[in-house]
Amino acid sequence: MSNARGGLDFRVLYPCDLLLPSGLTSPLSLSLSPPPPKKAPHQYGRDGTNWGPRLYSGSARRWWQGRGMSTRSRSVQGSVGGGGSTAGGSAVPLAVLLRREVVSERTAAERPELQHGLFSQAKKGEDFVFLKPDCERLPGFPSSSFSAFGLFDGHNGNGAAIYTKENLLNNILGAVPADLNREDWLAALPRAMVAAFVKTDKDFQTVARSSGTTVTFVIIDGLVVTVASVGDSRCVLEAEGSIYQLSSDHRFDASKEEVDRVTEAGGDVGRLNVVGGAEIGPLRCWPGGLCLSRTIGDQDVGEFIVPVPLVKQVKLSTAGGRLIISSDGVWDALTAEQALNCSRGLSPEAAAEQIVKDAVHSKGLRDDTTCIVVDLVPEKGNPAMSAPKKQPGMGVFKNMFRKKTSSDSSSHADREYMDPDIVEEIFEDECALLSRRLDSEYPVRNMFKLFICAICQVELKPNQGISVHEDSSQPGNLRRWDGPFLCQSCQEKKEAMEGKRRSRDSSSRNSGSSE
């Protein structure tokens, strides 16, 4: 609250309202006039209820409330040392200090050691990888660090794979507001990955039209793993003695829903016709003969081959786990169980090599065969990262939050709300509709700027944006007032992907195959 006379304002947080962490001795926060240029964002409940200024992250709020304490603050006006304004900056508000300390302590406890290995045998030279274990969202701030790993299996040339490798991560970071804390960054990441995949595909149209690529892209922040994928490269996780599929095969043979979606959008899906009318081989989209329903690139096949990824976000237990990211050269020869069994007990480098060699030995080198292995290893000497007792056979995700039962003892109030020895599913969505994937519930929606194109991130004037919900084929269902918004070119891209703006005429099936 600003002082109209230019004096110093201060806010008192009473001891009965919160417990100060170690290292903070004063409950008093001072700020100088003029008031800070940026107003604290408001936090909203899932039903849209305004909770007021967001003083704490969601986990921090639950942390305080779990101890029977309130996050309310009481403001009083007053002046200290006279009424004049003092130059030289202002003190950091206490709420910010509290949030930083709580978040940094939790983040430090959730930082496993990462070890990774790579091995590949080339047939066509169209597999490319992205390995960047040391990234920072905010340069110079180690607390914003994360790791990124990507696998790009190109077809019909390597242009799309190389372009995606060079641009995808920058497009992801460009779609996330830079000033988010870690919790909000993780919440915003699924939508940002969708926007980045579509932007990368749209931008690649200006470079080439005939090349395409699968993408499996993994971002690891502490114990939280977020995977976005199109095509038939896969990412599997082994943790707590169980195997979890973090990607999906976007092959027409694997999904009737994808066949129906492409057919409704104007595509022709069927098997290869040979002399005599017989049909052979896998289901493919014609023209072009692509057997994948989602990729980046492949503009010569049709816009209904969409770049909208499956996104899964999970939180590992403190025991860590092993990720295997491989192209279809591995998965056409080995099951997930076989890949994990043949590499168990080996270092990531040796494991990746063993998986590739077993796959090639089984089927021969018919295609580029690439494997990335990433181990999340509990830090030695960190009791928060010590391995819990295994629960073999647990192969299903737990909900992100669980209700505390009456049998939970009050002496366990300091425990997290989540069990420490399970793999938790935070987010999963595979819908191909951008109107659903770019829309967000509160509080996530409040993290993104309104008058920015949700895909390409260009600034929009209030009268320029087109609602992602607008449907030109059904004028009666327009929602022009409801964001997020798209620029004109991204709206055209969206309509082409949904078959409402035909990008080219379908032609007859031919014997050419892109994948």
Image (cartoon, grey):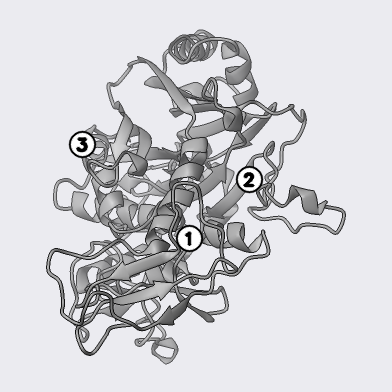
In the rendered image, residue 146, in percent from the top left (x then y), is placed at: 37, 38
- The local crowd at label 1, few if under 14, some if 14 to 19, many if 20 or more residues have their Cα within 10 Å, is some
- Choose between 228 and 360: the one closer to the eye: 228
Q: Amino acid at mark 1?
A: Ser
Above or below, 476 against 2 in this view is: below
In the image, 19 versus 224, the foreground residue is 19
* Amino acid bearing label 3: Gly
Residue 11 showing in the rendered view: yes
Identify residue for label 3: 159
Disc 3 is placed on an element classified as helix
Q: Are marks 2 and 1 in contact (CB under 8 Å)?
A: no
Q: Is residue 98 left or right of residue 71?
A: left
Choose top left, top right, bottom left or bottom right for residue 388. top right
Mark 2, secondary structure of its residue:
strand
Q: Which residue is mark 2?
A: 424
Residue at the image point whose x is 61% and y is 48% from the top: 425
Quickly name the residue at label 1: 57
Query: Where is the C terminus found, in terms of image quarters?
Result: top left
Residue found 37% across the figure and 35% down from its top: 147
